[in-house]
Image (tube, rainbow, N blue to C red):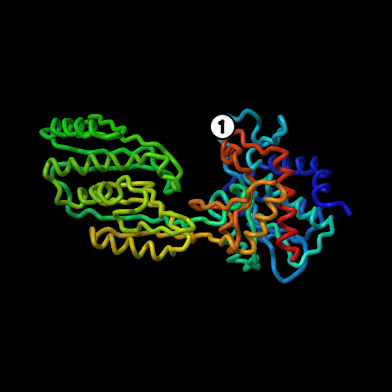
Amino acid sequence: MADMDSLIDQWKDEIVEETRNLIKIRSVEEPAKNDRPFGDGPYEALRYSLELSEKLGFSTRNHENFAGHAEWGQGRDIVGILVHLDVVPEGSGWSYPPYEGRVVDGKIYGRGASDDKGPAVAALYALRAVKEAGIPLKKRVRIIFGTNEESGWGCMKHYFEEKKEEIPAMGFSPDAGFPIINREKGILIFNIDKNFERLPEKIRINSIKGGQRPNMVPDYCEADIRVKDDLREDIMRKFDSFKKGKDASLEMEESSDGFIVKSYGVSAHGSTPENGKNAIVPLAEFLAELFGCINDENNDVAEFIKFIAKYIGCEIHGESLNIHFKDEPSGDLVLNLGMVEMDENKGRLVINIRYPVTFKGEEVIKGLESSLAGIDKSLKLSDISDNPPLYVPADSPLVIKLQKVYKEVTGEEPELIAIGGGTYARAIPNAVAFGAQFPGKPEVAHERDEYIEIDDLIRCTKIFAHAIAALAGE
Ligand SMILES: [Zn+2]
C-alpha cells in the first residue's frame, strides 16, 4: 500500500483542479433565497464540495444548505476539521480574473484560493490519503464545511445549535496560519450610551460621527458644531493653539453657522490598535478643551466628550476604565474605540475589547460597569456581544500531537501563537487554528490577487493527512 505522502504527490493535479473548480464558484454572501440561506454562491460551493466528498468515498450530510460535513472512520469520538466555502467580495484591481483559478508561476490565483478553498480541498485530500493508505482509525473524522464564516457564522450556529450536531472531541481549522494558534482572546463588542438632557449654552454639537466598524481603528471623524458669531474668533484661535501642541491631523472649516472639524487617523485592525491612530480621540480632546475654555462645561454633551478624552483617550488597554486585565498565556486586554455617533440628544460609542484567555466576558463587563458608575451614572452599556476566548493549553494532547506532526513534515519549529482572536477554530471547543498560511509568506486573504502556491497546497495536504492520522489513529 502506498504511503500518504506519495499518494498526495500523485494527486497533485487533481488537488489543483478541484481548488480551481471551487474558486470558479463565486460564493459571496447574498440575501437568502428559497432554500439557500446565504444566496446562490455559498449554496453551490457547498453542493459541489459534498458531491466531491462522496466521489472520494466519504459519507456526507447537508444541513439545509447552511453547513455540511464529509465523514470517514469509526469510533465514538470525532476529530473535526473546520473549513469554510464562502468568500469575501473580490474588490477591484486584480491582475487575473478573480473567479477563474488561473495558474501562473506555480500559484493558483483567485478569491478564496487561500481563504479558505485551497485549505478545504487540502483537508479533503488529506482524509482521502488516510483512507487509501489504509491508516486504521479509532475516531471518526469530519470535515465540516461552513458557508457563512465571512459574515456572521450563521452556518455554525445552525449546524451546532439548531441541528444539535455532535460536537467534535477535538479539532483544528486551517483558516489562519501555521504553526499553531492555541490562544485567542475573547472578543466583546458593546455600546456606551448617554442621553443628553442638560445641553450646552454656547456651542451646539449638531453631530459627531467617526469610524465604520467596531473592529477597525477609525481613520476619520467629523464634528459639525454650531456657535454664536461672537465666539468664532475665540474658537479659531483655540483650534490653532491646540493643533500646535498635538501630533494629530485636524482641520477646521467654517460653515454658515459654525464649524466642521475633521480629524484624520490611521486605520488598523481592532486587535492591534497600537498600529493605528484613532481619529476620534484628538477631536474629542479638542472639543473637551474648548468646552473648558469657554466655560460651558456643566452639561451632558461636554461631559460625554470629556469622558472620551479622559477615560479612553489614546489608552489601548482600558487603563483609566480599570479593566486592564492581563494573564501569562495571552497578555493584555486590548481596547479599541471603533465608532462614535452623536447628535444633539444622545451619544454612542462602539467599543471592541479583546480580553485575555483566562478571563470571562462578564468579569470585564462587571469591571467596566463599576467604573462607569463611579464616573457618570448616566453612561449605560448596550448591545453587549461576547465571543469567549479560545485556549488550548500547551500540554494538551491536541497541541502536542499537532506540534509533532508539524515538526516532522516541515522540519520547522512548531511554535505556539497567541492572537487577538477571531479564527474559525473558536466554533468548537478544544480546537486550534492550524494552517494553512506558512510563516513568513505574505498575507493574501481578502486582498486583490489572492493566491495559494501549489507547493504550499500540497505541503499542507500532507501536514493535514499526518495530523488526521495522529489525532484519529488512537
Ligand atoms: Zn477564512
- Asked where in the image residue 355 lies, by quadrant, the reply is bottom left
- Asked where in the image residue 284 lies, by quadrant, the reply is top left
The residue indicated by pointer 1 is: 92
Residue 148: x %, y % from top left: 59, 52
Q: Amino acid at mark 1?
A: Ser
Tell me, yes or no, if residue 35 can be seen here.
no
SS class, disc 1: loop
In this figure, what is the number of numbered marks? Answer: 1
Q: Is 250 above or below relative to 21?
A: above
Q: Residue at x 23, y 48 (%)?
A: 306
Q: Residue at x 41, y 52 (%)?
A: 334
Which of the two residues, 27 or 366, is positioned nearer the viewer here? 366
Side of 280 where 79 appears, left or right: right
Q: Quadrant of the N terminus?
A: bottom right
Is the residue marked 1 within 8 Å of ligand 1, measured from its CB?
A: no
Q: Is 242 above or below relative to 155?
A: above
Q: Residue furthest right?
A: 1
Tell me, yes or no, if residue 258 can be seen here.
yes
Which of the two residues, 192 or 133, is positioned nearer the viewer here? 133
Q: Residue furthest bottom?
A: 76
Q: Quadrant of the C terminus?
A: bottom right
Residue 359: x %, y % from top left: 44, 63
- Mark 1 is surrounded, within 10 Å at the Cα level, by few (under 14), some (14 to 19) or many (20 or more) other residues, namely few
Residue 129: x %, y % from top left: 80, 53
Residue 171: x %, y % from top left: 65, 60
